Image (cartoon, rainbow, N blue to C red):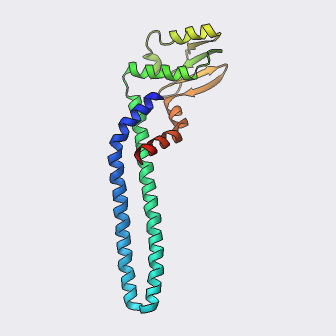
Amino acid sequence: MAGVNTILNEILQQAEEEAKGILQEANAQADSVKAAAEADAQEIRGRYAEKAEQDAKNYDERISSQIDLKRRQALLSAKQSVISEIIGKAYDKLMAQDENAYFEMIKKVLAENIDYTKDGEILFSKKDKDRLPFGFLVDMQLQGFVKGGGIKVSSETANIDSGFILRYGGIDQNCSLKALFSEKQEELQDIVHRVLW
């Protein structure tokens, strides 16, 4: 996932300005609502004297509380939107890599997930299987041979858009990029949140 962090850092700088704009807009909307509420409260004060003063105070407190709640909800929504967009852009950027970079990343993911002590097979999408570089698994097969296991490319294809499926004795391990992103969703959200805010 080292490639994902690098891509996230590139995208975070672009998204930071967008996030600031969204937050400023949310604050401006909250100020506008508060100003309107204060104008309403002033009118009530003028009509009802002392009782109106107390009513207005209560109204102000309720409105302030509502404004604060709406402001916090708008900020949270804006942050979630920016975070989702950044993670989506990171995924798109990984998918748009040239073949060499893409398969180097796949090798790293495979190296992190392969069990060299067992015999297994790897299933690629039809697209990836058709463009698989010559000798892609040679290094990994040699390591498996030394440790007593082996991995081969399956004659089957997987119904995934990227990445691969590892199969050991009928048990599948989904290593598609979508599955990996989904598995790391909370961690990625925390990273993006820390960097932006």
- Outermost residue, right direction? 169
Q: Can I make out residue 127 in this image?
A: no
Residue 188: give x, y in percent of width and height. Answer: 49, 39
Q: Position of residue 164 (x, y in %)?
A: 52, 23
The percent position of residue 28, horizontal first and vertical second, equals 34, 63
Quick check: 118 left or right of 102? right
Q: In terms of depth relative to the viewer, which is nearer, 64 or 96?
A: 64
Reply above or below: 185 against 65. Answer: above
The residue shown at (43%, 62%) is: 71
Dividing the picture into quadrants, the one containing residue 40 is bottom left
- Compared with 77, 62 (above or below) is below
Across and down, in percent, residue 170 comes to 66, 21
What number of labels is visible?
0
Along the viewing direction, whichever of 111 and 174 lies nearer the viewer: 111
Q: Is residue 44 above or below residue 130?
A: below
Residue 182 visible in the snapshot: yes
Q: Residue at x 47, y 64 (%)?
A: 69
Residue drawn at 45 percent across, 20 percent down: 128
Q: Quadrant of residue 13?
A: top left
